Image (cartoon, coloured by chain):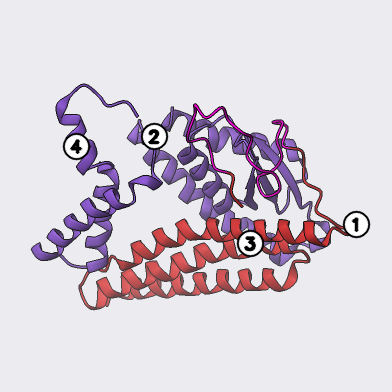
Amino acid sequence: MARTEHPGAGLRERWLPHPLMTLTLVVVWMLLLNGFSLGGLLLGAVLGVVIPIVTSHFWPGRPPLQAWDRALAFTALALWDVIVANVIVARLILFRDPATLASRWVRLPLELRSPEAITILAGTISLTPGTVSCDLSADGRALLVHCLDAPDAEAAVREMKTRYEARLKEIFP
Amino acid sequence: MAIWLEALIALLIVVSGVFILVGSLGLLKLPTLMMRLHAPTKATTLGVGGALLASMGFFWAVEGTISVHELLVTAFLFLTAPVTAHFIAKAHLHLERKRDGGERERLPQTGTGSGWSTYDPAPQTGGEEGDSAPGEG
């Protein structure tokens, strides 16, 4: 990896390879403690520095996350869809004869390339209405999704692409 | 504790209980593994979520303490549920291939020139682009 010219950047990259992960770790640590104390914060900060350095080999790239407002909007949309998904799947289980369910595999061609974005897309698909993402093509360009009830496979794919992938493309350009 | 708060917490517990029950019913009722996989990844997320909200509300109203562990439980649940479903699906695909009878799952083509990563290795890259998506199964 080519080093940048700024002398400060190398130092920061060495000690804080993933500032966001550091922040997340500190916040999660404070939440785990379920109360605030200076010692807790200090230990959290130490963990927040040490863990990203130790595990930095697992995270070769930095996800180029932009547009925080859109990321928040996406989270809200996904949460709402999880609630809707629960009601839809519950209705299917309770009131439909399983033999009439049009359960099928569909292929979702991916335009996203960043592994982080694909992971978020696959996770969202798994949590939302009647779909579970099951496999990725070996070159990472298509996602295998199983639908519980999709009479129209084309429409299901189109909805996943416009509802989630298009938004993720704006968040991870 | 205010009566409306009590009612709200009770409602949350009942609703979450219903969703967990339906999720379990789905496990019992649906005919194939892939269909059964949908029940626990969905119905239980809301079920557990509702119970956690009720727990937060209860401790806030009764003990006056704000408990945030529930938020963490929710976050970890949302992280792990898709991963578990993914693992089960992959194990299922491997088993289906091993069985290889007439009823093997008919997967759609990837349409990208290489197969699904459960079955096929990642295409060889020129070595220049070091970190392409790993396709381990």
- Quickly name the residue at label 3: B88
Chain for disc number 3:
B
Q: CA distance from mark 1 to mark 4?
A: 58 Å
Instruction: Name the residue rendered at 37%, 32% in the picture.
Output: A64
Res A1 → quadrant: top left
Chief SS of the magenta region: loop
Looking at the picture, which amino acid does disc 2 mark? Answer: Arg
Q: Are marks 1 and 2 in contact (CB under 8 Å)?
A: no
Residue A105 lies, in percent from the top left, at 74, 47
Chain for disc number 2:
A
Is circle 2 on the same chain as circle 4? yes
Q: Secondary structure at mark 2?
A: helix
Instruction: Name the residue rendered at 84%, 58% in the picture.
Output: B100
Chain for disc number 4:
A
- The earlier-in-sequence mark between 2 and 4 is 4
Looking at the picture, which amino acid does disc 3 mark? Answer: Ile
Q: Colour of chain B?
A: red
> Counting other residues with Cα less than 10 Å from the Cα at mark 3, is it few (<14), some (14-19), or many (20 or more)?
some
Chain coloured purple in the rendered structure: A
- Quickly name the residue at label 2: A70
Is circle 4 on the same chain as circle 3? no
Instruction: Name the residue rendered at 28%, 65% in the picture.
Output: B68
- Quickly name the residue at label 4: A12
Q: CA distance from mark 3 to mark 1?
A: 21 Å
Q: Secondary structure at mark 3?
A: helix
Looking at the picture, which amino acid does disc 4 mark? Answer: Arg
Residue A51 lies, in percent from the top left, at 28, 54
Q: Is residue B24 within the magenta segment?
A: no
Q: Residue B102 bears which disc, if any?
A: 1
Magenta region, residue range:
B110-134
